[in-house]
Amino acid sequence: MILTQESSLSISTDIAVCYADEGGMEDARSLAQRLGLPLLDQYDLRDQQFPQLLICESGTRRLQQTGRKAPGPVLADFVSGAVAHRRKFGGGKGQMIAKAVGIKGSIRPRVADVTAGLGRDSFVLATLGCEVQMVERSPIIHALLESGLQQAQEDLEVADIAARMSLVHADSISWLSGRQGDIQPPQVVYVDPMFPHTDKSALVKKEMRVFRDVVGDDRDSEALLRAALNLAEYRVVVKRPRKAPAIEGQTPSYQLSGKSSRYDIYTLKSLSQSQ
């Protein structure tokens, strides 16, 4: 697992860092200093002095809204829950995301996921054998990913998958532009910009609330697509809600549609078995 930090992006002042046990104390202190956020020695989830709390506990980090009716925590978990179920029963190379990025036969492209979020799609691609570079611009979400990757690296069942994942904290457009001229650019750039999702599940609604508060809307999707097309060696893949319009600009080469989501594929040249 490679962890690098290329930029110091702005952070909401509505967030404080705290710790739930002695095991999380040192991490909380270090994280608060790194992010320039207040550190709380004690906290009450019913107290809304800070709308969001970044809670450290014995090697884990989670983001928790406050208030009496606040939803549960949001975290990057590559070991248990829905991600573990998908790893074991998700359909392997038959999954739509696998087809979208070009996994076929022995082909396992190098992928840059430039809107990493909580890393679920990156983890699926790494599970299928791809080397995945995750780029996340939010310092808070990056901190969650950092913790989730560390846990995965230490878990015997998924350590080999985590070894194929790396993480950088940077603005994606700047990161893509800065990679021009690289000897080994990503073969595929994967983009999943923030969009009003139609999925009504409690999990998605909870996470979307947190992401909109912490990350905000993606208002630069066109510029991000242009930067991705300028760097990707073989293709750019954009994930969209099924009925959403394509990002303005270049027309997708083709699309793959499922029940709730769609992949717009922008082909630059064909992946070959030798890659």
Image (cartoon, rainbow, N blue to C red):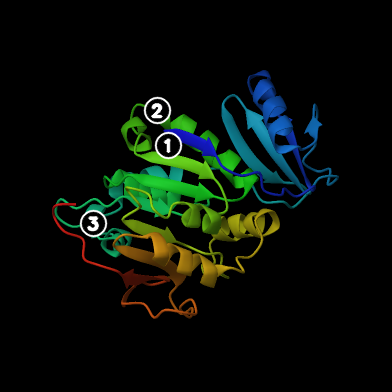
Mark 1–mark 2 contact, CB under 8 Å? yes
Residue receiving disc 3: 103
Query: Dot 3, how many residues are within 10 Å of its Cα: few (below 14), some (14-19), or many (20+)?
Result: many
Q: Is residue 98 above or below residue 200?
A: above
Q: Amino acid at mark 2?
A: Asp
In the drawing, does residue 41 fall left or right of residue 163?
right
Residue receiving disc 2: 155
Which residue is rendered at x = 53% and y = 55% of the image? 172
Question: Which quadrant of the view contains residue 53?
Answer: top right
- Camera sees residue 102: yes
Gap in Å between the C-alphas at discs 3 and 2?
Answer: 26 Å
In the drawing, does residue 152 fall left or right of residue 104?
right
- Helix, strand or loop under label 3: loop
Q: Nearer the viewer, residue 184 or 165?
A: 184
Residue receiving disc 1: 79
| Sequence-earlier tag: 1 or 2 | 1
Gap in Å between the C-alphas at discs 1 and 2?
Answer: 7 Å
Q: Is residue 182 above or below residue 147?
A: below
Q: Position of residue 104 (x, y in %)?
A: 18, 57
